[in-house]
Amino acid sequence: MAREFQRGHKAKISDLTAGTDLYVGVSIAGPGLTFDISCFGLDANEQLSDDRYFVFYNQPKSPEESIQQLGAQAGDSESFRVTLDRIPAGIHRLSFTASVDGDGQMSQIGPGYIRIVAGGEEVVRYSFTGSEFSTERALMIGDFYLKDVWRFAAVGQGFDGGLAALLKNFGGEVAEEEAAPEQQVPAQATGAPGFAPPPQAAAPAPSFGAPAQAPAQAPAPAAAFAAPPQPAAHQPAAPQQPVHSAPTMVGPLTTPPAAPYGQPPHPPQQPGPPSYGQVPGRQPGYGGQVPPPAPAPAPYGQQPAYGQQPPYGQQPSYGQQPPYGQAPGQAPGQIPGQQPAAGAGLAAALQPYKEAPTGARWTPQNQQLMRVDLSMGGQAVLARQGSMVLYQGKVDFSYKGAGFAGRIVGNATGQEMQLMRCTGRGQVFLAETGAHLHAIELQGDGICVSAENVLAFDESLQHEVRRIEGHGIPGGALFTMQFQGSGTVIVKTHGVPVVLPVTPTTFADSNAIVAWSSASQVIISSQVRLRRNAYPGHSGETVNLQFRGAPGNFIVVQPYEV
C-alpha cells in the first residue's frame, strides 16, 4: 500500500523500501502547455557544482548512470531510474523539478503527482494541483536528500521564472545562443488533454525496482577514470599519484625547420664543370655579377613550375627552361657532346632517402615512418596488426590478443584493437596510412593516449584500456590506453600536433584529443542549452572533454576534426 504524502512530509528511504534501485514517476499536464521535467544533482551546498549531474532532455543520464531519464511510460509524463548506492559521495541532493516550456503558469495545471516505485510496487506518492500555485512557471516537486541516510521529501514549492531561473538558482550557467526560431512541441495530438493520469490498472506500475519498459540493454557503467567519485566544486582534487611535468620526447612533436613538409632535405651539390661560354675560375655573368639563385626545387613527385630548375639528376619537363648555362637536353654537370656518367644522377637523387643512421632503439626515418631495432634492449614490441611495412634480419611476428579490455573496445567500436608481437634480432619499419608518427619515451611516469592514436609500444610498459563514456560522444564512448613505467610509445596523429598545459578552462574535442598526462582528470562537458538542438543553425559543439589538474599537466591535440 503506497503512503500518501502531503507537502513538507519526509521519510527515510529505508522506511519505505529496502531496495536502492528506484523508479521515480512524475505526472504533470495542463491545457496547451509543454513541460520540461528535470533532475538536479546538487552538492552539500545545494549547488550544481558539476553540470554532468543536471539530467534533462539534452543529457539523459549522469556519468556513472546512477540517475537516468527514461521518458514517458506507465502513465507518467516523465520517469527516472535512481540507483542510490551508485550516486557519488559529492552528490547530497536530487531535486526533481518541472518547468513550463513557453507561455503558461503553474496555476493552469491539473492534478499531478510524483511517485516512487520499488520492486514493482508503489511505495509513496505525493499529489498536487494547480490551485496551490499562482504565477509561478517552475515547480520543485520532490527531493531525495542525504542526511546520514537517503531520505525523501515532498517539496511542492513554486518558483518564479522557468528552467533558466531554476538553473541559475542552483548555480548552473545558461549557454548563450543566437536567436533562432524555436520549434514548438505540441502538448498532445488530440485537443486539450485530460487532467487526470490514466488509471493505474490500465497502466501498471513498473515491476522492477526498474520500470517495466526499461531500455532493452542498460549500458555498462563508466569506469572510475571517467567519473571520479567526488568532483571538486571550484578547485580540482589533488592527484593521487606524482604529477609528471612533461614526457621525454625521443622525436620532436613539431616538424623540423630544415625542409618544408613532404620535401626531402636537399644535399649540397658539388660545383660541376664550367657552363658553356664561362671561363674557369671566374664568376659567371657579365661584369662579374652573380645570377640570382635558382628557386627551391619542387616537392618530391611534383613537376617544377615553368622556368624553375628541376632537382639534381632530373630532366626538365616539357616546356620547362633548362638551368642557367645548360643546353636543352643536357644533364646537369655534363660537358656538351659527352655521354653522361652512368648512375651518378640516380645515386644523387636517392641520397636524401637513405635509411637514417642507427644508434637508438627507435629511430624516425621521416615524419611517417618509424624504425625499431629489436636487438637493442632485448624486449618485444607490440604494434598494430598490419602496420609493418618492412623488416630486416630474423624477426618473428605472432598474434597478441587484446584480452577482455580489447573485446570491450571491439564490441563498442566495431573494430577490435588487434596487436602483433614482434621479437627477434632485426629491424622493423612501422607506418599506417601516412599518419605522422611521434616517439614518446616514458621514464617511470605515465601518459594516457587515445586508443585510435596508438601505433606501437614496448612490451615492458604497463598498459590498460580505459573507457570515458558520455552522451553525445561519437560511438558512445572514448577508449584510451594508459601507459606506465619505462619504455617508448609510438603515437600517430593527423598532421602536426600541439602540446598545451592543462588549465581550469581547458576543453578539447573528442576527435582532436591525442594524449594527456595520466594525472589529469577528464570529465565530459555538456554545453547546457535551454532549447532543443533541432533548430537550424545549431553549432554542433555541445559535448567536449574538460581537463583538470595541477600545474605541470598537459594535453596533446591534433589538427583534425571529423
Image (spheres, rainbow, N blue to C red):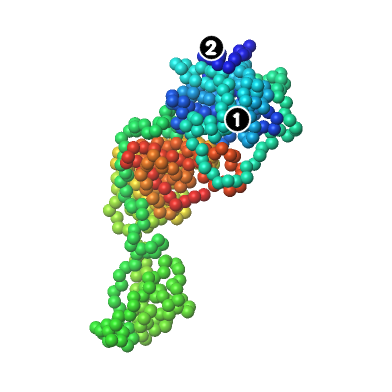
Identity of the residue drawn at 52% across and 28% down: 40
Relative to residue 252, is residue 476 depicted above or below? above
The amino acid on which the numbered mark 1 sits, given as a three-letter code, is Arg
Residue at the left extreme, as displayed: 281
**Quick one: label 2, few (<14), some, or many (20+) residues within 10 Å?**
few
Left or right: 277 as drawn, with respect to 55: left
Residue 301 percent across, percent down from the top left: 44, 67
Identity of the residue drawn at 52% across and 42% down: 176
- Looking at the rendered image, the quarter that the N terminus falls into is top right
The amino acid on which the numbered mark 2 sits, given as a three-letter code, is Asp
Left or right: 223 as drawn, with respect to 249: right
Query: Which residue is the site of mark 1?
Result: 137
Query: Which residue is the site of mark 2?
Result: 15
Relative to residue 147, is residue 314 depicted above or below? below
Label 1 element class: loop
Whether residue 144 is visible here, answered yes or no, is yes
203 and 392: which one is in front? 203
Q: Quadrant of residue 523?
A: top left
Label 2 element class: helix
Identity of the residue drawn at 44% across and 39% down: 546
